[in-house]
Image (spheres, rainbow, N blue to C red):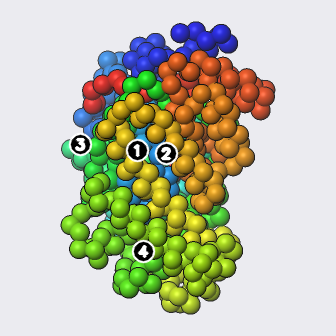
Amino acid sequence: MEASSGLRVFQSLADVYEEADVPSQTARWHTIKANFEAKFGHAPTFFARSPGKIRRRIECVNYPDWTPFDPGRVNIIGEHIDYSGYSVLPLALSTQDVVMAVRVNTSSPPTVTVHNSSPEKFPTRSFPLLSQEQGYVQLSATSGHSSDWMNYLKGGFKSMLDFLKPTALVGFDIFVDGSVPAGAGVSSSAAFSCSLCEAIAFGLGQTTISSEDLVPQAIRAEHLAGVSCGGMDQSISLLGRRGCCLTINFVPKLSAEVVTVPQGVKFAVVNTGVVADKAETAPANYNRRVVETRAAAALLYKHHGIPLPTLPKQPTIRSFQDLYLEQQSQPAFTPKTARSVLQQMVVLVDYLLGPKSAFDDRASRGWTRAEIASELGNDWWSRFVGDMRIAGDQFMLYNRLRHVLTEAERVYAFREVCEKGGANAVNELGRLMNESQDSCRDLFECSCPEIDEVCNIGRSLGSLGSRLTGAGWGGCTVHLVPDNEVERFTEGVFQQYLAKKFPAKPHTLVREYERYLANTREKSTNH
Ligand code: NG1
Ligand code: MG
């Protein structure tokens, strides 16, 4: 359908693939291969792509016949709860991805050299690989202190080499081409880390490593780069199916289930154009939230008579829900029991940490490090924070915990509505998404004025539910739009936000967002 503004609106994912993706992908592969040859003087031996699976990557050696599959992700609901171990509900996107052309080399010492198709943003980087005794990779002094992509490269190599423990090392020539917009909340860093981890495994001859094994390594790569993220992005990147919403569970172990969204609606993703550089702002924003939720959980345990969990220093996926449930002698956190347990926990949190609790003033002004220490002991920092970079001395324990628990319940509620269906289902889904946005804005404080504005505009244009997606503080928003409102929505968002706010580049942003327009109706096959 041509909207009156001349924008192309895809009616289904099938259209996106047919009309936009396949031909341009083939041309792109040729360009990446040519660029690799120009830089390194020989052809790449294989390609890695995130999301992807080893099986497919091997096929990529004959890349002209290769068809594209899943790239970045948009989180539909369940924000900032993955690092507390609660289930999330993202959707794998259809076009944006990270591709790496790779060849191993026999340089001595083994050397990694990486070129990028956007050299101004990602300048060429090169570093040697060390022996196993030397820890394989000398992490940069800036690791965890800047968003230089070298940190992500080194993090990936260190994580994978520590995992695979190869005795014979080889060097790597890599050319990277990424189309997931950076700092937009659609997980460019995870697409990068996953693709890199796959490339390293394959380069070292580990062709049968499973996606489930790769997920924790890709998570650790990002931790080494300085962001203490949860596991949502790497999971959907490596386990996702295109155009499918998944519930991703982290406890008792990593698992994914397909969620089918009712007919008659699409998810539209609108980029606010505000770049949120998470690695740069992590100490004040993302990492601080991680610490706030950990300390809040620990306080809850303490005051509820549950012994403090011993948390590992570099946890991959952590959870306090399973510990709570252990206490409740429940075998597992099933969707059936989940909602009522979460509701009880909210009551408990209000009672213990809320405005009417013994910590009444701290509910609104936050806690200082010293105040937390007086509750959790002087070693709380080394136990819960370690070498994570944190800025500021205000920790909003009550609000953050309340967000985590209510958001976790909304994920279960969302899934239930999708399963049950019914006449009011889509309105109910929209309501949950709006509630999530309110909680992100007011309790988790990870929204920003532009996100709020786009959400309000979106709702006025027929969206049933509008919210930020990803870490927030900028980046993308996601909207649940009835099929018959898509045209009005598209046109309106362009006129009322993009063209006004970014007169120089509204079309770039619109193109991006159009390509994200997707629903989960299409039964696409797993790759
Ligand atoms: P984005 O917005 O892609 O940077 C981040 C984290 C997730 C999750 C969300 C918030 C990374 C790689 N991902 O996503 O683990 O916590 O924020 O729900 O840092
Ligand atoms: Mg990211």
Position of residue 47 measured from the top left corner of the image (x, y, whole percent): 37, 33
The kind of residue on which mark 4 rests is Lys
With respect to residue 135, does 63 lie above or below?
A: above
Q: Secondary structure at mark 4?
A: loop
Indicate which disc, 3 or 4, sits on the residue closer to the N terminus: 3
Q: Which mark is residue 244?
A: none
Q: Are marks 2 and 1 in contact (CB under 8 Å)?
A: yes
Which is more toward the observer, 520 or 104? Answer: 520
Which is more toward the observer, 429 or 452? Answer: 429
Which is more toward the observer, 40 or 398? Answer: 398
| Relative to 117, 50 lies left or right | left
The kind of residue on which mark 1 rests is Phe
The residue identified by callout 2 is: 432
Indicate which disc, 2 or 1, sits on the residue closer to the N terminus: 1
Q: Which mark is residue 207?
A: 3
The kind of residue on which mark 3 rests is Thr
Q: Are marks 4 and 2 in contact (CB under 8 Å)?
A: no
Indicate which disc, 1 or 3, sits on the residue closer to the N terminus: 3
| Relative to 112, 57 lies left or right | left
Q: Nearer the viewer, mark 3 or mark 2?
A: 2
Q: Residue at x 32, y 42 (%)?
A: 239
Q: Secondary structure at mark 2?
A: helix
The residue identified by callout 4 is: 313
What is the count of numbered marks?
A: 4
Q: Residue at x 52, y 65 (%)?
A: 402
The kind of residue on which mark 2 rests is Leu
